Image (cartoon, helix red, strand yellow):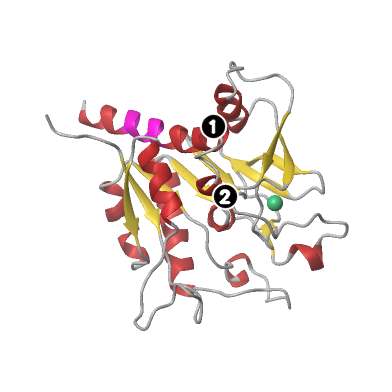
């Protein structure tokens, strides 16, 4: 019997120059947590380094789902802004590739989970903007660049009622069906950028108490969800984090089954 699992494309990128991940030769890097979480949810991770944007449709034609991983800042030119002083490292090749992938995935209704930089790419690809630097652009903002272990949740988010995210979290807590009222979750936080103007077609699914957007989803797609936190660092001890990957892999599996008839 053949082993079968939905194929989940997982984006990767170049390490920051001078970082421990940057070796003597050019390479790509991906935290193993993304691959481990996809495997734990029943999917097969397929690592996607940046390619030419024109290859996006061809890549997705062979995949059942897409996972956008964390990484550096998006070039603000993609949303029509000049760089502010707080702007961080940019990877132009990765920006172009991931934005093409997201646009193709949305057009195909391919299941999509977008993490940290990923939710920012999702919003920009769909026509939204970003806050280039929370500390300098959001008065009274919380600390979103935590100094604590990666799996440790340092701030709460309010998850909107009636959202896919709310339903996933409720099912992980054994309180399904989805609650009629907002629910609270605690998340980790490793970002200095955030969603600005929300793209047409996307809806805010969660916010921090300082107003910063922490999750987006598309009500018009089978599964298109982005979170600003890092569930790939939390899933081993947090059923709600694992539920996000299960949601992606389950939607990808259903799509694969339907395609194969
Ligand atoms: Mn945060």
Name the side, left or right, on which 184 lies relative to 225: right
Name the side, left or right, on which 73 lies relative to 84: left
Residue on which disc 2 sits: 230
Q: Is residue 222 visible?
A: no
Mark number, residue 157 = none
Residue on which disc 1 sits: 239
Label 1: element kind: helix
Q: Is residue 211 above or below residue 237?
A: below
Taking depth in this image into account, of 248 and 96 the one nearest to the observer is 248
Q: Is residue 106 magenta?
A: no
Q: Residue furthest right?
A: 140
Where does the magenta region start and end? Answer: 249-255
Q: Position of residue 90 (x, y in %)?
A: 55, 74
Dominant secondary structure of the magenta stretch? Answer: helix
Taking depth in this image into account, of 32 and 62 the one nearest to the observer is 32
Label 2: element kind: loop
Q: Position of residue 6 (x, y in %)?
A: 30, 38
Q: Is residue 250 magenta?
A: yes
Q: Is residue 260 above or below residue 138?
A: above
Residue at left 37%, top 83%? 24
Residue at left 49%, top 67%? 95
């Amino acid at each position: 019997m053949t082993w079968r699992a939905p194929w989940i494309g997982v984006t990767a990128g170049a390490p920051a120059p001078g970082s421990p991940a940057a070796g003597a030769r050019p390479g790509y890097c991906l935290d193993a947590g993304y691959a481990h979480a996809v495997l734990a949810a029943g999917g097969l991770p397929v690592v996607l380094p940046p390619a030419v944007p024109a290859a996006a449709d061809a890549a997705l034609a062979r995949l059942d789902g897409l996972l956008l991983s964390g990484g550096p800042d998006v070039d603000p030119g993609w949303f029509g802004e000049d760089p502010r002083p707080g702007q961080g490292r940019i990877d132009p090749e990765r920006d172009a590739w991931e934005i093409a992938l997201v646009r193709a995935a949305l057009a195909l209704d391919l299941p999509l989970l977008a993490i940290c930089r990923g939710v920012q790419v999702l919003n920009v690809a769909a026509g939204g903007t970003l806050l280039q630097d929370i500390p300098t652009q959001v008065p009274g903002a919380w600390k979103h660049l935590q100094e604590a272990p990666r799996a440790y949740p340092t701030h709460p988010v309010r998850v909107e009622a009636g959202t896919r995210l709310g339903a996933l979290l409720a099912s992980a807590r054994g309180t399904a069906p989805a609650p009629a009222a907002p629910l609270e979750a605690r998340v980790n936080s490793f970002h200095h950028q955030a969603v600005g103007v929300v793209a047409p077609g996307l809806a805010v699914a969660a916010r921090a108490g300082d107003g910063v957007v922490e999750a987006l989803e598309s009500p018009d797609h089978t599964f298109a969800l982005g979170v600003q936190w890092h569930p790939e660092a939390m899933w081993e001890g947090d059923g709600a984090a694992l539920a996000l990957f299960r949601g992606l892999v389950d939607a990808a599996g259903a799509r694969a089954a339907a395609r194969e008839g």
